[in-house]
Image: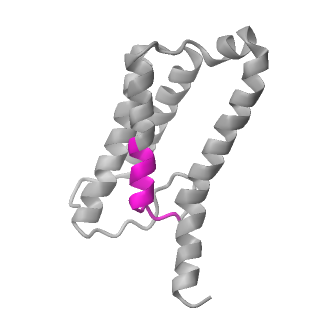
Amino acid sequence: MRLPASVLVVRLLAVAETVIGVAALAKGGRLAWFLVAVSYLGFAGFVLLAMAHGEAISSCGCFGGPGTPPTLTHVLIALSASGLAVAAAVTRPPGPLLDGLRSDPLIAVPYVILIGCCVWFAYAAIAVLPRTASYRINGG
């Protein structure tokens, strides 16, 4: 894409994403959730731009290793996550996650299980589905 690239910049962006996510979960609030939305939107935009330019991106880096090339599914999940973060920021922004879980334990357990399932399905759609589709296309 002819953008300046360095390992340091990529790692700093990864650290920034992590800090934003932890801040949103630990403190909550409008600003944190808007930053989460911007982070997901920026990633989706970069991948769409790379795909439009025909650039080959070997891996998104989301899972710490090669072999997870970004696809349209990846972009759609990132856009969905961005939309959910905007909704959290615009409506009644959630406070600290642990406070919410402690205040209503009967809802906390199913909530945590539901979030775990959503994360697993997103992982499967991003990392597993492209490999299985490739396997099927190649006659496996």
Give x and y (percent) for residue 110: 74, 29
Q: Is residue 1 toward the left or the right of residue 63 in the image?
A: left
The question of residue 73 being in magenta is answered with: yes
Magenta span: 68-79
Reply above or below: 65 against 44.
below
Reply above or below: 36 against 93.
below
Reply above or below: 87 against 70.
above
Give x and y (percent) for residue 92: 46, 12
Q: How is the image coloured?
A: one colour
From the viewer's side, name the closer residue of 84 and 4. Answer: 84
Residue 23 visible at all: yes
From the viewer's side, name the closer residue of 80 and 16. Answer: 80
Judged by its main secondary structure, the magenta piece is helix
For the C terminus, the image quarter is bottom right
**In which image quadrant can residue 13 be found?**
top left
All told, the count of numbered labels is 0
**In which image quadrant can residue 70 be found?**
bottom left
Instruction: Identify the residue at image location x=56%, y=50%.
Output: 122
The question of residue 139 being in magenta is answered with: no
For the N terminus, the image quarter is bottom left
Instruction: Identify the residue at image location x=35%, y=48%.
Output: 44
Instruction: Identify the residue at image location x=40%, y=36%.
Output: 82
Give x and y (percent) for residue 126: 53, 58
From the viewer's side, name the closer residue of 92 and 7. Answer: 92
Q: Is residue 106 toward the left or the right of residue 83 in the image?
A: right
Instruction: Identify the residue at image location x=25%, y=70%.
Output: 54
